[in-house]
Image: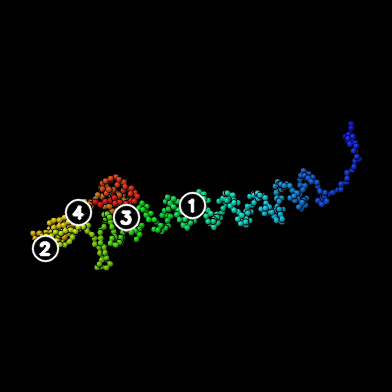
Amino acid sequence: MTKLSDEIKKVYENEEVQDQPFPEVPAHTHNGVDSQPLAPQSVGSTQLKENAVSAGNLMDLSVTEEKLAAAAVATSKIKDDAVTAAKVYKAGSVITLSAQIAEAVIITAHIQDLAVKWAKIGNLEVGNSKIMDAAISRGKIQDLAVDNAKIENETITNSKIGLLQVGNSRIMDAAISTAKIQDLAVGWAELANMSVGNSKIMNAAISTAKIQDAAITDAEIGWLNAGKITAGTMSADRVWGGALYSDYVHIRMCGQEALNVAGNINKTGWSNFVIPHPLQKGKLLVYTAPEAAEVLLIHRGSDKLINGERVVTFPAHFQAVSDPRKVTAYVTARDDCNGLFVKELDKAHMLVKECAGGSSNAAFDFFVFTIREGAFDKEFEPDGELLLQRDGESNESFRERFREYRIKQIKKQGGDIEKKIAEFNKAWQTTPAVINEQYVQPK
């Protein structure tokens, strides 16, 4: 069998040389000083035993950024707590500047609770552009942390307040004062029904100057009694077209007139004339008017006979307001004569004659009574009770009698009774004390 070396000799027989010994390699140690440098890439991770390269085996500054490949030192290659603040330096200072910190290197999980304080944040460093939407919730704002002093004028507008976000429970007492409400800002549309009641209005809060003319009508006023009217607050020209009930009314003189009444006057007391007593200081002189069961007109005077007779003509105004169907005259002689009697009598004149054919010129006094025109058929004993509130009678009871009385008057007038009653009832529901001229007409 031929040896491999013999075959090689045959191939290289023309170039065969004698073997030469290897040069001597001086002995050396790995002391980091006189050790020979290693060839590039001669030491790989597979050639290093675990824990073979430790911090104690590396000289200061022996591992530089230039000797580390990009991304060579990853988080997974660094033991926990291996990199401390003392090991991180640049130019003699701990790396803290933004330019030295890569994007997204510091995340929320890397920051301890309370580690970032106001003292560590520069002025205006945290602006609106740096705060994500919904990043600041109510839960992150302490009570009273945001007060008026920290909110600029017009910073909070309606468009920045969500629907129903500001409710009664979020408004402190007295937080909204008059000075904070613009003129006309609160209209009827913003007030719920009955939301402004007497209990919510301060005394004297609504003055006359705050009420427009004709703003308050009969329909807006309930029953008005004397207890609600202070002295001098209601003048005669402020009461019209309705009914006024009062325990006591004092009417002052206004020029030549103090009280004008368009309809009838019903009363239970007397019609008195009262003045300070002219002869007894400190006392009153009280006269009262005569009363009768008919509407009487009176004309009186004095005259004298001429040859036993006299025609007395009554004034034109007395004739104009008198009913001719019931005229009564009384004469009284003031001189000695045979006596006097009334021969003729109507609402225009009377003829007075001496009795027994006498022809004296005796003086006499006379009284003439007539009935006011339009009142001859007046019923002074009408059906039912007099339309005045009785002692102890409730307002509700009197109002019902009042309403029934008015309806009876409407029926007596005739015409379209149903329509008139419907109109009256409608007005009654609006103003319970209404007395309308179209319903009450004197006869």
| Amino acid type of the residue that numbered disc 4 sits on in the rendered structure | Asp
Residue 177 image position (x, y, % from top left): 47, 57
Which label sits in the foreground, 4 or 1? 4
Question: Which residue position is annotated with label 3?
Answer: 240
Question: Which residue position is annotated with label 1?
Answer: 168
Which label sits in the foreground, 1 or 2? 2
| Amino acid type of the residue that numbered disc 1 sits on in the rendered structure | Asn
169 relative to 131 in the view: left or right: left
Residues 340 and 350: in front is 350
Residue 148 image position (x, y, % from top left): 53, 57
| Amino acid type of the residue that numbered disc 2 sits on in the rendered structure | Asn
Residue 256 image position (x, y, % from top left): 28, 62
| Amino acid type of the residue that numbered disc 3 sits on in the rendered structure | Trp
Q: Residue furthest front?
A: 14
Mark-to-mark CA distance, 1 and 2:
99 Å
Mark-to-mark CA distance, 3 and 4:
31 Å
Mark-to-mark CA distance, 4 and 1:
74 Å
Element at label 2: loop
> Which residue occupies 23% across, 59% down?
289
Question: Which residue position is annotated with label 4?
Answer: 323
Element at label 3: loop
Which is nearer the N-term, disc 4 or disc 1?
Answer: 1
Q: Residue furthest right?
A: 18
Mark-to-mark CA distance, 1 and 3:
44 Å
